[in-house]
Image (cartoon, grey):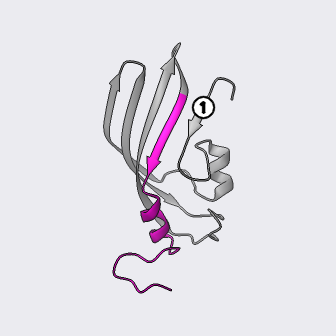
Amino acid sequence: MPGWSATSPASWSTSPRAKSWCGISAPADRFREDQIAEGDKVATRYTGTWTHRGEFMGIPPTGKDVTVTRIEILRIADGKFVEHWESFDQLGLLQQLGAIPAPGQAGG
């Protein structure tokens, strides 16, 4: 999209097409916990539950619902979102998918 910049710590972007491609479906439940606006930026912290329906980061589909807390910051210019940054609990996500042992589980 012209004039749009997105930054994410994972190997996927925030576009619906990219999320579908990587196997994470749209959130079944999404709860906004905090939202702060100042100047040209809006920050939102929310927790969402997604379903792992296709390959994601090399992990075959599990059908599991995963719950992840994310923080997103959007920059607005001329009434449009022009930049996006996000951070989320990648370790917790991979543990929920069974790719990494959770604390207290034996390593494989």
Foreground residue, 64 or 4?
Answer: 4
Q: What stretch is highlighted in magenta?
A: 83-108
Numbered marks: total = 1
- Image: 41 above or below 26: above
Give the amino acid type for the residue marked by disc 1 in the picture.
Ser
Residue 45 is covered by the magenta coloring: no
Residue 38: x and y in percent read 34, 22
Residue 12: x and y in percent read 62, 50
Q: Residue at x 46, y 84 (%)?
A: 107
Picture quadrant where residue 41 is located: top left
- Image: 69 above or below 83: below
Residue 90 is covered by the magenta coloring: yes
- Image: 85 above or below 88: above
Q: Residue at x 62, y 62 (%)?
A: 57
Residue neighbourhood size for the residue with mark 1, other residues' Cα within 10 Å, grouped as few (<14), some (14–19), many (≥20): few
Residue 19: x and y in percent read 62, 50
In the rendered structure, the answer to whether residue 77 lies left or right of residue 43 reads right
Given the current orientation, which residue lies at the most extreme top position? Answer: 78
Q: Residue at x 64, y 71 (%)?
A: 60
Residue 53: x and y in percent read 61, 64
Kindly state the secondary structure of the residue where label 1 is placed.
strand
In the rendered structure, the answer to whether residue 67 lies left or right of residue 81 reads left
Q: Which residue is drawn at 44% across and 39% down?
A: 72
Q: Quadrant of the N terminus?
A: top right
The residue that mark 1 highlights is 5
